[in-house]
Image (cartoon, rainbow, N blue to C red):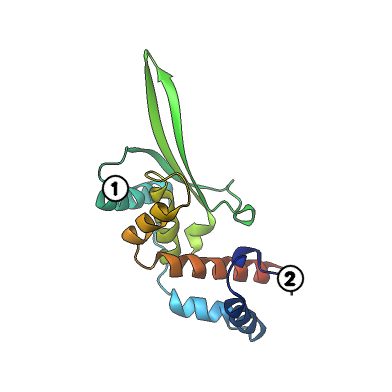
Amino acid sequence: MEPFKYLVGYPEHLLAKVRQLIEQGRLGTMLADRYAEPNMVRNDAQLYDYVQALKDRHLRKAVPLGKVLYDSKLQVMKHALGTHTAISRVHGGRLKASREIRIATVFRDAPADFLRMIVVHELAHMKEADHNKAFYQLCTHMEPDYHQLEFDLRLYLTHMELTRG
């Protein structure tokens, strides 16, 4: 079996357990049992409110969000689950900055915990640009189970790719 592209860098003992779950046909069932809560954030307006509530709770002093939306052009298979951008425009004699968060549409149908994980990830980029220690500390401050959710999201994406093919 070819190496799992979403699980690159994880220890071999974990990959062996994943291979075993796949061979037994239990990966999807395990994920469905663990993440049974459906995602109720269905459209861009709900997504904006959801992200804004998390931002207000954890990053009150961060710059305001200009736009939050599901983006069908983000390709999960190209490792873009969400994006955070800062756009600067000249507005009269001033420079006006706007922040945007775009989430891949695959999260519209993903379990609620996975949407929360990717939103926390993109919000953390408002304070920390790089994936460094401070970035991950901020992620775990906003979502204590961040690392487990990230790993399980990688399993979910692996399962989606295997069932698609």
In the rendered structure, which disc, 1 or 2, sits on the residue that comes first in sequence?
2
Identify the amino acid type marked 1: Leu
Residue count near mark 1 (Cα–Cα under 10 Å), binned few <14, some 14–19, many ≥20: some
Q: In the displayed image of the protein, which residue is found farthest to the right?
A: 1
Q: Is residue 87 above or below residue 36?
A: above
For the C terminus, give its image quadrant: bottom right
The three-letter code of the residue at mark 2 reads Glu
Report the residue at 39% width, 53% height from top. 134
Residue hosting label 1: 59
70 or 125: nearer the viewer: 125
Q: How many numbered marks does the figure carry? A: 2
On the image, numbered disc 2 is attached to which residue? 2
**What residue is shown at x 29% (from left), y 48% (from top)?**
59
Residue 56, position as x, y percentages in the image: 26, 48
**Alpha carbon separation for disc pair 1 and 2:** 41 Å
Residue 73 rendering spot, x and y as whole percentages: 59, 46
